[in-house]
């Protein structure tokens, strides 16, 4: 959506407050015509509002006054109005900026105005709402590209496994496997070997 550099919202509110200013100015000069009377609701915490501490404690947020029979010294300026009213028999002097007015109502003709409290800087171009996520990287520390990220080495939780050693092709013979002289058999004649001749065959009888 395009930025509203003209600020139609502020202009519309100012035009409506101009209606209230004109009506109160005419009442200050000529009094209330016919059965017209006004209910004005305003923000007691707004900047520029002046009222007694007693009334401020009784109405800490907003207050509605009635301009009908018992009011005096109504004075209207370009951005505020002042009026004298009686509250419980105690006279009070109130000063109310038009920017603090929230509602205006004339019951005699059932005409009313409701004003919005608009922040002047809320819709300025370039303003960033607080809800926007903050980037995780800044210009001073750019994010790493995938090629720059080095893989992390992980250490196994348990002891390193023992590498398997292949068995030798010809395992050495154990000492108990060597043939002994007591168990050696004479060579077979058919195997082509020489005959063993005993000495007792050459002895004379």
Image (spheres, helix red, strand yellow):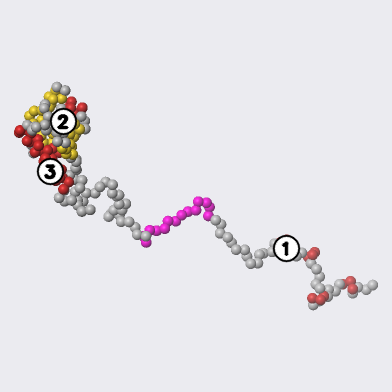
Above/below status of 151 relative to 83: below
First along the sequence among labels 1 and 3: 3
Which numbered marker is on residue 203? none
Q: Nearer the viewer, residue 45 or 203?
A: 45
First along the sequence among labels 2 and 1: 2
Residue 171 percent coordinates (x, y): 66, 64
Question: Disc 2 to disc 3, how far (Cα)?
Answer: 22 Å
> Magenta segment, principal secondary structure?
loop
Q: Nearer the viewer, residue 79 or 201?
A: 79
Q: Is residue 202 visible?
A: yes
**Mark 2 or 1, closer to the camera:** 2
Residue carrying label 1: 177
Residue lying at 13% horizontally and 25% vertically, measured from the top left: 86
Task: Give the magenta-colored segment's residue range.
Answer: 147-160
Residue carrying label 3: 15
Question: Disc 1 to disc 3, how far (Cα)?
Answer: 118 Å
Residue 181 percent coordinates (x, y): 78, 65
Residue lying at 19% horizontally and 48% vertically, measured from the top left: 124
Q: Are marks 2 and 3 in contact (CB under 8 Å)?
A: no
Helix, strand or loop for disc 1: helix
First along the sequence among labels 2 and 3: 3
Residue at the outermost left position: 29
């Amino acid at each position: 959506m395009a930025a509203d550099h003209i600020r139609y919202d502020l202009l519309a509110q100012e035009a409506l407050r101009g209606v209230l200013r004109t009506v109160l100015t005419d009442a200050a000069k000529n009094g209330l015509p016919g059965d017209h009377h006004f209910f004005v609701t305003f923000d007691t915490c707004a900047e520029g509002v002046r009222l007694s501490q007693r009334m401020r404690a009784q109405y800490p947020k907003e207050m509605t006054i009635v301009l009908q029979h018992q009011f005096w010294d109504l004075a209207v300026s370009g951005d505020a109005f002042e009026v004298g009213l009686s509250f419980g028999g105690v006279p009070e002097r109130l000063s109310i900026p038009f920017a603090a007015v929230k509602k205006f109502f004339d019951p005699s003709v059932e005409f009313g105005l409701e004003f919005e409290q608009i922040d002047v800087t809320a819709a300025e171009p370039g303003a960033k709402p607080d809800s926007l996520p903050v980037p995780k990287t800044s210009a001073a520390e750019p994010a790493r590209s995938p090629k720059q990220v080095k893989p992390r080495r992980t250490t196994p939780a348990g002891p390193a496994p023992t590498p398997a050693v292949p068995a030798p092709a010809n395992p050495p013979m154990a000492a108990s496997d060597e043939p002994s002289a007591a168990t050696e058999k004479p060579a077979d004649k058919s195997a082509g070997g020489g005959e063993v001749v005993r000495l007792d065959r050459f002895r004379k009888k």
